Image (tube, helix red, strand yellow):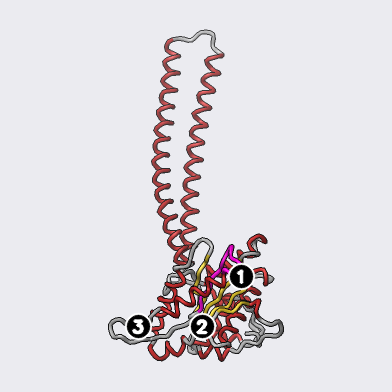
Amino acid sequence: MRRMNVSALPRNYALYYEAVTNPQSEIAAALARLGEAPPQSRLDELAEAQLDRPEAAKVSEAHGEIMSKLSEIIALLKIEQTALEKYGQLLGETSLGLNGRHALSQDFLQRVVSLISTATDTTLDHGRKIASSMSDRSAELAEVQSKLAKYKKLADTDALTQLSNRRSFDREIAAIYEDKRKVMFSSLILADIDMFKPVNDTHGHPVGDRILQIVAGIFGARSCSRVFVARAGGEEFALILRDYTEESATRLAEEIRLAVEQTPFVNVATGKDYGPITISFGLCMASEAEGPDDLYTKADRALYASKSNGRNRVTRYSELATGNFVKNWLLYASD
């Protein structure tokens, strides 16, 4: 990606990862057509078409339904407002007419009472109909809101692992730098299952998918209000931590690393052992980066250092020597 002048954005990593792991895919062919130094706008279009879930379209559709129902409710309220204004105007005019008369006959008073009574009944009946329509629209709106919440969750969830997906991850990592107070004790941990490609190639994708689900369960068990967990793509996971020092973030990564290392990956029916499965980590504090892209790049450098130094370990970006850094994609291809 560096050689092709492609920005180190998470979605770009996802595109090129898919292309490397599946060279016959539509993504690989599309990237080949874009050639060297593809414009970011074209990469965004490709990511939207190939990576984004169809539930995103459903979110937009549900949002449109909500706006339509709200428009109907507003229209009903305006109708009711107009009816009440006319009723108020009638009462006002009647009051003025009565005040201007010195002598009021019994017949005249009966006609006034009949007029006001009819207008009152009409207004009340109209109000009941509006209230019924409002109730119906409110019930429909609640149903659409429920669908919207469901679709939003689907649009932000990885189908295989049930963790948050890259779309949600991109939003969370960007949010770190929206408030300077969040930066000091926020961090990013990237994790990659070691030697996953050989396991996948040897035992097949169903086994690989099951391994991903088990590892995802270990990560998901650590999710809470201060720990955001996502599948960043392929066999890569990401954690965004808030209110963690570098030491406490490292301890969490070590806890997960040990849990994965100690988990048996055995087919209960056949007794086939697919292990050992281990995982490497790269950690970077948000305060060490200039923004979301830089934070991702530096955490990825720390992850690569873990891979280079024997795998199954946690490396902090702060431990790395400064200087030029060239990533060896062959190492990732072997994983």
Q: Which residue is identified by label 2?
A: 312
Q: Residues within 10 Å of mark 3 (few under 14, many from 20)?
A: some
Residue 55: image x %, image y %?
45, 67
Indicate left or right for 180 with 145 as reference. right
Say what amino acid the circle numbered 3 marks.
Answer: Val
When the figure is inspected, residue 193 is found, relative to residue 225, above or below; the finding is: below
When the figure is inspected, residue 327 is found, relative to residue 104, above or below; the finding is: below
Of 164 and 139, nearer the camera is 164
* Magenta-tinted stretch: 236-248
Of 99 and 139, nearer the camera is 139
Say what amino acid the circle numbered 2 marks.
Answer: Asn
Determine the residue positioned at 36% across, 86% down. 273
Q: Residues within 10 Å of mark 1 (few under 14, many from 20)?
A: some
Determine the residue positioned at 39% across, 38% down. 129
Say the numbered circle drawn on residue 146. Answer: none
**How many numbered marks appear?**
3
Q: Is residue 28 visible?
A: no
Say the numbered circle drawn on residue 266. Answer: 3
Of 205 and 271, nearer the camera is 271
Residue 70: image x %, image y %?
49, 49
Q: Is residue 142 visible?
A: yes
Q: Secondary structure at mark 2?
A: loop
When the figure is inspected, residue 328 is found, relative to residue 268, above or below; the finding is: below
Q: Which residue is identified by label 1?
A: 246
- First reached walking from the N terminus: tag 1 or tag 2: 1
